[in-house]
Image (cartoon, grey):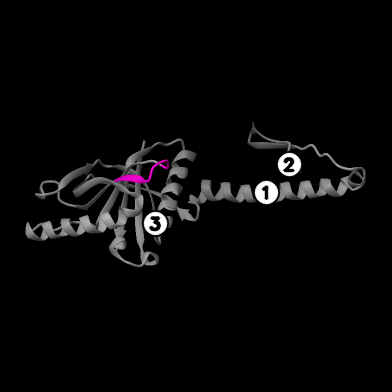
Amino acid sequence: MPWGRIQVKNALPGTLIEMTRTRHCSYFSRMWKWILSWQDSSLLKKNLAELETLVRQRADQHIYYGFIISETGLSPGTFAGYRATVHKKDVFRYFSLQIQNVYSLCQKQGILSPGRACLLRYAESVDTDSSEVFAGLPIPDYLQLAGTQRVKLPAGTFATTIAEGGEPQIEKARLAIRKYLADRNLTLKMPVVEEYIHESAANSDPSLWKTKIYAAYK
């Protein structure tokens, strides 16, 4: 039988949850009303226990979908690379090709990157198959890598987590960060930065990918 209504009310020092339910039972079912009531109560207690676990994980441990979200302050960053709108299924192929080009230009111009290759994700819509991204390497701010585009990220506080695995895990980690920010009434600031540890996206085995994700907010 469907639940009639579950209502959540503010009640100091906690939250009051009220449940009402209407059953349409046969005569013989009504004879077992006390059993049905016990089943309702047992199911409600189980669901509330699961809800309590979820809320405590998010509020106290900052765990979302299995990802631990933390916050860190970052200095300004400058990236040299290429920005384009590509099909979502081609994002990592695009990243791999463009990063190879950037590495090659760095070698030719004698520039040493101070960090790991990154993918910057800009506006991304669930209603389309495309994604606007920037594939690049961090470079010293005072240098200009000829033949590339340049992106500067301001200093700030970032929500961050680590994804282990391919694109489904990376996408889930981004969602975890979005939920973390939404729970705290914070607004995500694009782009979201994906830092590939051990050149993850260039590795042909996604199960070995390890990606650190940073998201600025306001």
Marks 2 and 3 sit apart, C-alpha to C-alpha, by 37 Å
Residue 77 in the image: x percent, y percent? 22, 46
Q: Which mark is residue 113?
A: none
**Taking 167 as reference, is 10 above or below it?**
above
Which residue is nearer to you in this view: 67 or 84? 84
Does residue 129 belong to the magenta stretch? yes
Side of 166 relative to 197 (left or right): right
- Tell which circle, 1 or 3, labels the residue nearer the N-terminal end: 1
**Image quadrant in which the C terminus is located:** top left
Give residue 7's quadrant in the image.
Answer: top right
Q: Which residue is mark 3?
A: 167
Q: Amino acid at mark 2?
A: Pro
Indicate the secondary structure of the residue bearing disc 1.
helix
Give residue 164's quadrant in the image.
Answer: bottom left
Q: Which mark is residue 47?
A: 1
Q: Which residue is mark 2?
A: 2
Q: Amino acid at mark 3?
A: Glu
Residue drawn where x is 46% and y is 44% of the image: 180
**Image quadrant in which the N terminus is located:** top right
Does residue 164 belong to the magenta stretch? no
Which residue is nearer to you in this view: 81 or 161? 81
Residue extending farthest left: 109
